[in-house]
Amino acid sequence: MAETECPTPPGERSLLRRFTAYSLGTSLADFVYGAVFVTIFLGRGAEPWMVGSIMAGANLVGLLMEAPSGALGDRYGHRRLLFVGLLSWGAGFLFVGAAPTLPLTLVGMCFGTVGFALHSGTMSAILINRVGSRDRTTRIARIVRVGALSGRIGSALGAALVMVAGTWLSPGPLVACGGLLLLSLAALTPLSFPHVQGRPDRRIGVLVLESVSQVLSRRFAPMVALAMGAMSATVLLVASWQPMLLERFGQDVRLNGLFLLVMTLSLAAGAAAARWVHPRRPHVWGPLSVMAIGVPVVLAAHDVIPLIVGLVAAEFLIGLAGVVAGVWYQLMFTDANRNTMFSTISTLAMLAGVATSFSFGWLWDLWGIPVAVTVMASGAVIGGAISLVLTHLFPESTEFAEPERDDSARNSEPESS
C-alpha cells in the first residue's frame, strides 16, 4: 500500500530543494570515485588480496570516525559537521586523484573516508528534526525517499560523466574533479542550510553512551541486524562488480562508466519504488529486500545470467532496501540523539562491511571471484532473516518514536542562518 501524500509546508519544501541538490552533488562525486577506484588501485600496483584489505582498512578508519561523528553533530550542530565532513571528503578525493603511489593513495582514501563519516546523517537530521507531529510518518518517509532518490540520480550522473569524460581523462583526474565538487559544496554549506542549535551542555561521551545503550536494546535489535546485512550486501557488490567486469571485458574506463550508469539508474528506480511501500511496514519489506540482494550477484558471478542483468537487479534491491530501512531507522530515532543514533547503527553496519571486504579479498585470491561472491552473499541473507525473526520476537521494534516538541515550537525556528 502506498503512503498517503500530504501537503509539504513551504519551509520544508525550500529545505527539501537544497537537500536534493546536495544529495545529488555528493553522490555524483562519490560515484565518479566509485566507478574507478578499484581500477586506480590495480593500476598503482595492488594485488587482489590487497584490494580487499585496502577496502577493509578504509572501512575501519570510517568506523572509528563514524562512532563519535553523530555525537559531534548533536552537540555542536549538524551544519558545522556537514561543512567539516565535505571539506575532508573533497580533500581526500583530490589526494587520491593526484597521488603518484599506492601508499599516498591510501592516505587520500583515509581523508575521504573520514569526511564521508562526518557528513553522513547530518542533512537528514537537519530536516527531520524540524518535522513535528502532524503527518510525521509520511513526512519523514518523504524526506528519506527524496534524499535517496536524488542521491541515486546524482550517482547516475556520476557514472555518465565517467563514461563520457573517460574518453580523454584518466581515472585519477576524474576523481580529483569529484573532490573539487565536494569542496564547492562545503563552501556553500553555511548559505544552504539553517543553523541547528547543538547541545554544548552535554558531553560527547554521554551522547554516545545514551545512543549505544538505546541501539543495543531489544527495541533496535532487528534494525541492527538489517543494517549489517544491507552493508554486507552493498560492500560485496561494490567490491566485486569491477573485477568481474575486468575479467570479462578488460580495462576500459568508459565501460566502467556505462555499467555504473545502468546500475545507478536501477538504484534510483529501486529508491523510487519505495513510494509504494507503506511507511509503517518497513520492518517487513526491508529484510525481504536485503535477503534477495545477493541472489542475482551470485547468478551473474557463475554466468547463469548476464553480468549486467545481475548487477541491475541487485542495485534495484539495494535502492529499495536503503529507503525502506532508512525510514524505519528515522522513525525510531529520537530528535535529541538522532545523528548519534544514526552513527551508532552505521558503525555496527560498517563492522559487517569490514568483515565482508576483507574476507572477499582473501577468498577471491584463494578460489576466484565466483566462490568469493557465493560465500559472502550469505551475509545479507543471514542479516535479513535475523531481522525478520527479531521483529516478531520484539514487537516494540515497530513502535515508532514520538516527536519531542510540537509543530509550533519547530515552526518558530529560523529557516536559514
Image (spheres, helix red, strand yellow):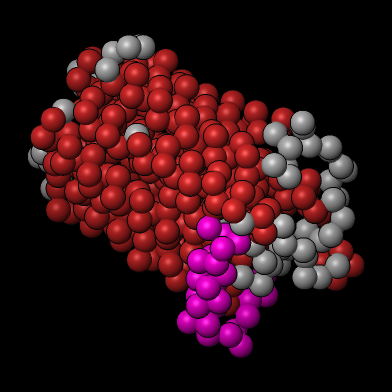
Up-down relation of residue 168 to residue 144 (above or below): above
Report the front residue among 270 and 35. 270
Q: Let me know if residue 99 appears in the view.
A: no
Q: Which residues are magenta?
A: 194-221
Residue depicted at 87% across the width and 64% down the height: 407
Up-down relation of residue 205 to residue 272 (above or below): below
Quick one: which residue is furthest to the front in this view? 393
Residue depicted at 13% across the width and 48% down the height: 101
Image location of residue 292, percent across then percent down:
47, 29
Q: Does residue 318 appear to the left or right of 241 in the view shown?
A: right
Q: Does residue 184 appear to the left or right of 251 in the view shown?
A: right
Residue depicted at 21% across the width and 28% down the height: 371
Q: Does residue 39 appear to the left or right of 275 in the view shown?
A: left
Report the front residue among 156 and 124. 124
Q: Is residue 204 magenta?
A: yes
Please tell me in which quadrant of the rendered image residue 207 appears.
bottom right
Q: Quadrant of the N terminus?
A: top right
Please tell me in which quadrant of the rendered image residue 271 appears.
top right
